[in-house]
Image: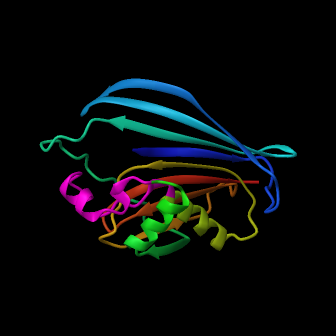
Amino acid sequence: MFAGGRLQFQHALRVDDAITRRSRIIDVKRKEGRTGPLVFVIVRHEISNAQGVALTEEHDIVYREHPRTDEVTPAPRAAPDASAWSREIRPDPVLLFRYSALTLNNHRIHYDRRYVTEVEGYPGLVVHGPLLATLLMDLLRRSLPEAQTTGFTFRAIRPLFDIAPFAVCGTIGQDRKSVPLWAKDAHSLAMEATATLA
């Protein structure tokens, strides 16, 4: 499962830049969770151009056993009430397939409805965690087009599915240097994030 991530933006990349990406696993931890064993993996990607590292991205990935049928789902968390900006997203199989293609993600939970409902037991196609993060960053760009983002952190709370619309929301933080962002469905918080501005 994709659990979250962090990005640090050191300098801009240009469309015609020659770039390199260095990826490595920087941490692996095994823990015992309430549902059984969990393995937490952090993968760091460094994207560089002629000026050096331009972007550092860390992915938090959790590996676990297939959920048991008697497993109790944690109670949903309420999303914040007030937002300065909000955008409704109506996910569909085409959006999920395109994002899978863009990110070279071939996991069937994002495009194979029969598999995801009959084998994985989900109610619909799963919206990618990174897609939610991308939509949150896009909301920031649309809402504050002149803002320069230096960092972005996000954490997945619960999955969203293509069977219902969801919203991406945000507001300006009290210090005016941080921007709280979140994704929610009609009932609960799905992802929380913070963008740091220059």
Residue at 42% across / 65% down in the picture? 81
Q: Is residue 131 above or below residue 88?
A: above
**Residue pushed farthest left?**
70
Can you say which quadrant of the picture contains the C terminus? bottom right
Residue at 22% across / 59% down in the picture? 117
**Do we see residue 82 in this rendering?**
no
Instruction: Report which quarter residue 162 is drawn in.
Output: bottom left
Q: Is residue 104 above or below residue 64?
A: below
Residue 169 position within the rendered picture, expressed as x and y whole percent measured from the top left:
50, 67
Residue 151 position within the rendered picture, expressed as x and y whole percent measured from the top left:
67, 49
Task: Specify whether 68 is left or right of 171.
Answer: left
Q: Point out the stretch of residues depicted in magenta.
A: 106-130
Task: Specify whether 106 is left or right of 71.
Answer: right
Colour scheme of the rendered structure: rainbow
**Do we see residue 185 in this rendering?**
yes
Residue 26 position within the rendered picture, expressed as x and y whole percent measured from the top left:
58, 28
Q: Is residue 47 above or below residue 100?
A: above
Q: Is residue 60 magenta?
A: no
Can you say which quadrant of the picture contains the N terminus? top left
What is the total number of numbered labels drawn onto the structure image?
0
Residue 167 position within the rendered picture, expressed as x and y whole percent measured from the top left:
44, 70
Which residue is more in the foreground, 74 or 134? 134
Residue at 47% across / 60% down in the picture? 100
Which residue is more in the foreground, 197 or 28? 28
Residue at 75% across / 59% down in the picture? 148
Q: Is residue 121 magenta?
A: yes
